[in-house]
Amino acid sequence: MKEFLSFSEEVQEARAKGLPVVALESTIISHGMPYPENVAMAKQCEQIIRDQGAVPATIALMDGKIKIGLDPADLEELGSNPDVVKVSRRDFPYIIASKKIGATTVAATMIAAELAGIKVFATGGIGGVHREGEVTMDISADLQELAQTSVAVVCAGAKSILDIGRTLEYLETNGVPVVGYKTDKFPSFYSRVSEFDVDFRLDTPEEMAQVMDTKWKLGLEGGLIIANPVPAESEFPYEQIESVTQQALAEAHEKGITGKKVTPFLLGKIKELTAGKSLETNIALVYHNAEVAAKLAVAYSKV
């Protein structure tokens, strides 16, 4: 797949100089937020990473290539074009061969980041086992990618719309460490907590970098989750967001919404039910993840 990689000038220069690089997904731009907030968010995330001494590499599939690092025109296209396809592992061959525009999910971004030699990736929240997943078998490909692709994913936990307990069980079975950054509790995206604990707590980027380095030097392939709670001033109380999520899930069930359409529908419905406050929380947690991921990338480059 490396022959299909295309690097922006900024990322190419960073690679040549051995500078720390942070991967960023693009589905959050195309499917996670409305326009124009999505493009503004993407640009600000990149700037936050630069401000911390690292180089951002937003990833997408365009013109038959896996683009590692996007220019402003690319971000605008991803944020405003309704024909952008949500891409996971299975979709790479078709989207690249047909030269369609593809926005990368957590799984797809991990694949591209590993190909490009990028070890740290900032996102919003990971996918996981959906509620009633034991019946529907609706399990995000993100989890399998975390089991096999050696990239550290900085996230605000798993999205609150998911079955967090079963998601953590899946990760445990596949040997994926869930590290809490300055927290003992696994965050649930909009909230700083959930009913579940993390595997390990670490309080500095340097400690996390050492764990990453040790894991891969031991030959233990696969990713790590760096669970980074949303800032306290921007969070929703866990009980409140759970109530709203239940309402959104009930409506999705009534309308027969399934597959790829579930997450965008639920996030949109939660935004509606919270009068837009959930979008503000979403943006705040993404910025916080970008900041922590940049600090981690800088620390890991020194290891």
Image: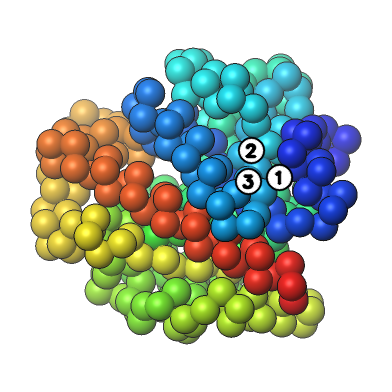
On-image quarter of the C terminus: bottom right
User: Element at badge 3?
Assistant: strand
Q: Residues within 10 Å of mark 3 (few under 14, many from 20)?
A: many
Q: Position of residue 38 (x, y in %)?
A: 41, 31
Q: Position of residue 204 (x, y in %)?
A: 52, 79
Q: Are the residues tagged 2 and 1 within 8 Å (C-beta)?
A: yes
Residue 24's mark? none
**Amino acid type, mark 3:** Pro
On-image quarter of the N terminus: top right
Task: Tell me if 116 is positioned left or right of 146 in this view.
Answer: right
**Amino acid type, mark 2:** Ile
Q: Are the residues tagged 3 and 1 within 8 Å (C-beta)?
A: no
Q: Which residue is mark 3?
A: 56
Q: Which residue is mark 1?
A: 112
Q: Residues within 10 Å of mark 2 (few under 14, many from 20)?
A: many
Q: Position of residue 144 (x, y in %)?
A: 58, 57
Q: Which residue is mark 2?
A: 59
